């Protein structure tokens, strides 16, 4: 409380951190007030408050001495400096360290928020219908002249090498035919298996698969 | 499938192969008749009927003959017809080799026996090696490739 009171009488910029009860970033993001505060903010409260209190405490004898004599003597100044300077320096260093830690935390937090915002922006752009329509139209407008220019060249090349075109067409046709044949064969074998199973169950006999194949049928390539 | 598939060609595969072969034969005969009719129409007149180039009776009689020739040649040379090849089946003798020409002819004639009330073909369903009467007569099997 002493530190907070000291800060209230001190710098106005620091008051914005302390007096509002919540840090500015929490107020901005709308986090609930009842949530536990970050440890860094309480440290800066303590550090800044202690620093200001110490500086005010050090100024009191100086002002008193100045009022009494109108001017401090050199030994008095040295004595006061010897008494107050180490404590002030120590408090200032601590406050600076605390500020640096808070700065690092806030920098990391800001980087994470920035990445999230950029990702959300990209996703929003990618899913936007207007953008998709625009990209499609732009791509079509750019590509169509290129395709129109390239097609005669492609046809010329294919006309120079008809074997390549024949090969492509034949391989595609064979691939389609082979796929259709495989599908038919697999379907027929599944049906064979189902019929065999049914007949074996009806006749209550040993499975037909237990029969050995003809001798050379399995050895022939 | 909890058990291995039998090495012998199953009922559905064989039926599909047979239908495919029959369809090919019909297509070939129809194509031949159409070509012959076209040629005759160009040079003489109509195709069917008395005194015409091809009688319908002869066409119907030619279909089994063409089918038999096709089967015998294919079984002897390759061990399979086009339909059986499409379904991954092969005709082998008891030793596992391609049937000889005589065995192929006997097998085709066995079709005629099997066709009596279709009993020979129905026997494929219940036989443990899926042999029809024609397979029993010619001592052949139909196996998966």
Image (cartoon, grey):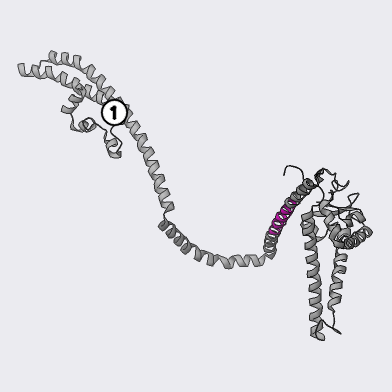
Classify the position of the N terminus of chain B by image quarter: top right
Please tell me whether residue A67 belongs to the stretch shown in magenta: no
Quadrant in the rendering for residue B23: bottom right
Question: Does residue A74 lie above or below A33 as drawn?
Answer: above
Spot the residue most to the bottom: B44
In the rendered structure, the answer to whether residue A95 lies left or right of residue B8 reads left
Closest to the observer: B75 or A96? B75
In magenta segment, residue A176: yes
**Mark 1, chain letter?**
A
Horizontal side, residue A91 vs residue A177: left or right: left
- Give the secondary structure at mark 1: helix
Q: Can residue A155 be seen from the camera position used here? A: yes
Name the spot of residue B26 as percent of width and height, x first.
80, 69
Check the image and report above or below for A179 versus B60. Answer: above
Q: Residue at x 61, y 67 (%)?
A: A155
Numbered circles on residues, count: 1
The location of residue B55, given as percent across then percent down, is: 85, 79
Q: Which residues are magenta?
A: A174-189
Q: Along the line of sight, which residue is nearer the eye, A197 or B81?
A: A197
Q: Residues within 10 Å of mark 1 (few under 14, many from 20)?
A: some
Residue A161 image-quadrant placement: bottom right
Examine the residues drawn in magenta and state their main secondary structure: helix
Mark 1 = which residue?
Answer: A41
Q: In the displayed image of the protein, which residue is found farthest to the right?
A: B102
């Amino acid at each position: 409380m002493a530190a907070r009171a000291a800060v209230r009488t001190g710098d106005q910029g620091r008051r914005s951190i302390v007096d509002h009860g919540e840090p500015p970033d929490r107020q901005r993001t709308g986090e609930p007030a009842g949530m536990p505060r970050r440890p860094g903010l309480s440290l800066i409260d303590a550090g800044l408050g202690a620093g200001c209190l110490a500086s005010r405490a050090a100024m009191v004898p100086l002002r008193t001495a100045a009022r009494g004599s109108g001017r401090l003597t050199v030994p008095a100044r040295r004595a006061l400096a010897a008494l107050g300077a180490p404590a002030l320096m120590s408090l200032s260093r601590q406050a600076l360290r605390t500020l640096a830690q808070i700065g690092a935390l806030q920098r990391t937090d800001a980087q994470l928020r920035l990445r999230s915002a950029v990702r959300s922006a990209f996703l929003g752009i990618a899913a936007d219908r207007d953008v998709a329509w625009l990209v499609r139209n732009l791509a079509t407008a750019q590509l169509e002249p290129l395709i129109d220019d390239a097609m005669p060249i492609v046809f010329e090349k294919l006309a120079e090498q008809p074997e390549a075109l024949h090969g492509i067409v034949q391989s595609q046709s064979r691939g389609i035919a082979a796929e259709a044949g495989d599908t038919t064969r697999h379907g027929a074998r599944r049906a064979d298996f189902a019929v065999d199973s049914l007949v074996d169950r009806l006749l209550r006999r040993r499975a037909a698969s237990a029969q050995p194949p003809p001798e050379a049928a399995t050895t022939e390539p | 499938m909890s058990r291995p598939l039998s090495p012998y060609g199953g009922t559905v595969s064989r039926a599909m192969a047979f239908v495919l072969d029959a369809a090919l034969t019909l297509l070939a005969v129809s194509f031949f008749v159409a070509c012959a009719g076209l040629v005759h129409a160009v040079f003489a007149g109509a195709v069917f009927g008395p005194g015409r180039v091809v009688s319908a009776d002869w066409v119907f009689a030619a279909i089994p003959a063409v089918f038999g020739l096709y089967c015998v040649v294919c079984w002897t040379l390759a061990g399979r017809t086009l339909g059986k090849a499409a379904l991954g089946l092969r005709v082998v003798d008891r030793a596992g080799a391609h049937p000889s020409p005589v065995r192929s002819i006997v097998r085709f004639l066995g079709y005629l026996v099997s066709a009596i009330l279709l009993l020979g073909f129905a026997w494929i369903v219940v036989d443990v090696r899926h042999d029809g009467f024609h397979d029993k007569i010619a001592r052949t099997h139909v196996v998966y490739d």
